[in-house]
Amino acid sequence: MAVLNLIPHNTNFDFIGKRKITFSIVILSTLIFMGSLLFKGLNYGIDFKGGVVMEVRMPTAPNIQHLREQLEPLKLGEVAIQEFGSAQDLMIKFENAEGKSNIPETAVNSIKTILGDGVEYRRIETVGPKVGDEMVHNGLMAVLYALLGILIYVAFRFEWRFALCAVIALGHDCFLILGMYSLFPLEFNETAITAILITAGYSINDTIVVLDRIRENIKRCRKITLVEILNKSINETLSRTILTVVTTFLAVLALFMFGGPVIAVFVLPILISMVIGTLSSIFVASPLLLYFNVKHGKALDEEEERIAKSLETEGRYEASVPKQFADDGVIEG
Amino acid sequence: MLFGLSQTRKITIIATCVAGILFCLPNMVSKELAEKFPSWLQNTVSLGLDLRGGSHLQLEVDLKAVNAEFLSNLLADVRGALRKEHIMYLNLRVEGRESNPKLFFDLKDISNKDKISNIIKKIDSSLLTEVSEQGQVSITVDPIAAQNRSKLIIEQSIEVIRRRIDETGTKEPTILRQGNDRIIIQLPGVDDPQEVKKRLGKTAKMTFNMVDSGAQNTGHAGPDSTMLDYVRGGEEGGRKIAVRNQVSVSGEDLIDAQATTDPQSGDIGVSLRFNNRGARKFAEISANSIGKQFAIVLDGKVLTAPVFREAIPSGVASISGGFHTIREANELALLLRAGSLPAPLKVVEERTVGPSLGADSIHDGRNATVIAFLMVSVFMFLGYSMFGLFANLALVFNMVLLFAGLSLLQATLTLPGIAGIAMTIGMAVDANVLIYERIKEELRAGTAALAAIEAGYERAMTTIIDSNLTTLIAAGVLYEFGSGPIRGFAVTTAIGISVSMFTALSVTKLVTAWWFKNKQVQTLPI
């Protein structure tokens, strides 16, 4: 036996019976995020709006307030200066002035002059606003294409009802991540789009495992209700769900803690989205099946009987194969 | 045959793992040692600009300006042609978008209606003319020709950019077309792209000058000529040519240059086409200089120096003889076309990563990946004891094969790519978790050890394939839509997950089979 029996088995939680409560929580949280998106909007980064990001390492820890005053006369609009990783490292950010389409090259040069000598420029990014527009468009299209591709695959491998439930759950996850960027104003940039797609990738992986077990149990257990089948399937896969989310979470947590400040910003939303993606398989994708009239129990028995009958009819038809074929003899296993 | 592992399958699994270690090796050893390996074993993972440091520039080619110029030339040409043919017209006007303009005019005399098509075709064969019964003429540009024109402009721009960047001595620049009107330049190791940008902004000077034959014979420059280097096919042979300082025709007047093959003789040549001004000047000098040599000079270097065989009044000339291959002719044509930038360039995006940040990122990324690996391994061992160790061994091979795959595909590893590797570590063990949970379930249901293992692998298989393929769809989309660094993430995740399907299923199965054969246990340590 394993050193530690970490994960419980033979659990019998009633995940589906409390769906009124869980659905309410899902809907409420979705509404909160929707409200935030509508009223607060997204905190677009310079990837989307166009602007400048500079990461600099100063020879000595600078006085940020003093620096801010020095940059004031440049009239760059709102310049964000913050510590980045250590007291010596600074991140300086500002957006392109409205209506200006050119990269503010002179601005970068003036900042360099003010910062003086001995400064190491670790990263300088300047993005024109047009590039940003394309990124928003491409990003949205990417998320839509991913959802569509997954919908088609799942519909092909399972059936359309399962595909729809999976994709609704997936859309819910993507939306929640988007809302999170709005509610806890995180900078929405290209990595944010990536985080959403990673959420989709991870969440669908998890959802498929649960749906796969539901499909199996629907075929196997004809005497119990669909609610019971769903509960049984979720409970049976629960230990796997927990183990996998823990291993992946641990791996990403290592990135968050030890991967440096650039990676940390990238993986923080992914950490959160893993939890959301796992929960949505249990509390969104699975219970949704109840509302899609999935054939199970008696209905499935009857349908199989009907299919069996129609096969029999075909069998009769087969019996009247032309003689020349019958003459070729038969092979039997 | 334990667990359905035939001898061939066992050998395949082992061979794959050994090959993985082999192709991974060049990444592990020092550069000097790796260079001693045979050439097929020299591929290593290449690092993205965000890790090795460097500059990434995105340029926009101003096709609008080119289209506007094309249109104004077209208007002038149409006016000229109609005047020459003494055709009276009214309301010459332009409609439609700049990229796809339409020219309209009304004929004063409807009887000219049948001639129009031919007259317009003569200006440019890609022009399509329609004449209505009432004598209204509409001229459009063949959309395919227009598209080709834009494509040619981008190609020329890339060629000019490449030449100018090469001049700066930047190593391994990557210059790529992006979308319809963008060019991406990647300059590894360049932490201040000012110099490159300055060069790109410069307009190269191309001129057509006569050769000073007197000075050429003596080998010393005359009073009004200069000795210039002669470069052919990019090589400087040390030959010098005495070129007159006076510019006969400006390079700006050259509209097009194309490699040609004479359909009868098969002779290879380069055809030149000048605009009206250029044609007039070219006609003048060629008429006065039959038998004399002239030089095409680009940025102070002679590209070619042919001899006028006859007067060339039409503005269309052909340089022939002296080309051995069509490639040679193509190169010259390209250089001639690329002489000056065909369209203004604008920097729309610029990302520079200094070498220290890149080095820090590699360092941090490596640490984080190792820690992720250790945490997951420990967790798997705690969860599944002996079988957890099998899964961890599979995870080692997952990493080995991932790096082998990255090396073989010459994929670029980026900072998000490192994150992808750590993600893979977390997700790769999922396949084993699925299998082991199945085995546990079977054992609980009272199945015997051997049968439980077999059932576990078999029944988890479809789940593993379905869940991983859907994740691969998301990774594929990410690759298609993402920019450079993000693509790195898609690549590592996609390879990592694909490999995990092999390592988690085959490698662990093989190890489990060996172990089971030697131990013959009744209860499984899982």
Image (cartoon, coloured by chain):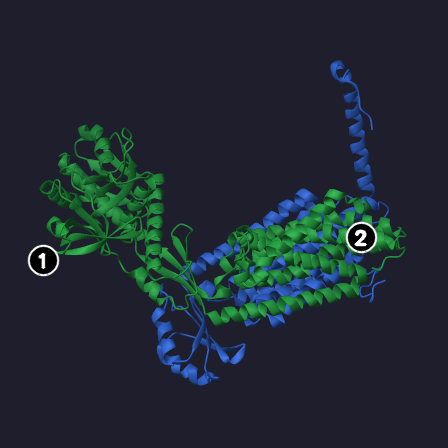
Q: Secondary structure under badge 1? A: loop
Vertical comparison of A111 with B432: above or below? below
Q: In which image quadrant can residue B403 be found?
A: bottom right
The answer for how far apart the CA atoms under marks 2 and 1 are is: 90 Å
Q: Evaluate whether residue B2 shows in this view.
A: yes
Circle number at residue B514:
2
**Residue at horizontal 77%, vertical 43%?**
B6
Earlier sequence position, callout 2 versus callout 1: 1
Chain letter behind tag 1: B
Of residues B466 and B141, the one drawn nearer to the viewer in this rendering: B466
Q: Give the residue type at disc 1.
A: Pro
Q: In which image quadrant can residue A255 be found?
A: bottom right
Q: Secondary structure under badge 2? A: helix
Shown colour of chain A: blue
Q: Residues within 10 Å of mark 2 (few under 14, many from 20)?
A: few
Please report contact status of discs 2 and 1: CB closer than 8 Å, yes or no.
Answer: no
Q: Give the residue type at disc 2.
A: Trp
Q: Position of residue B358 (x, y in %)?
A: 50, 68
Query: Label 1, on which residue?
Result: B223
In the picture, measured across the screen, residue A72 lies left or right of residue B215, that is: right
Q: Evaluate whether residue A166 shows in this view.
A: no
**Residue at horizontal 29%, vertical 32%?**
B266
Q: Position of residue B4 (x, y in %)?
A: 79, 44
Q: Position of residue B325 (x, y in %)?
A: 32, 39
Chain in green? B
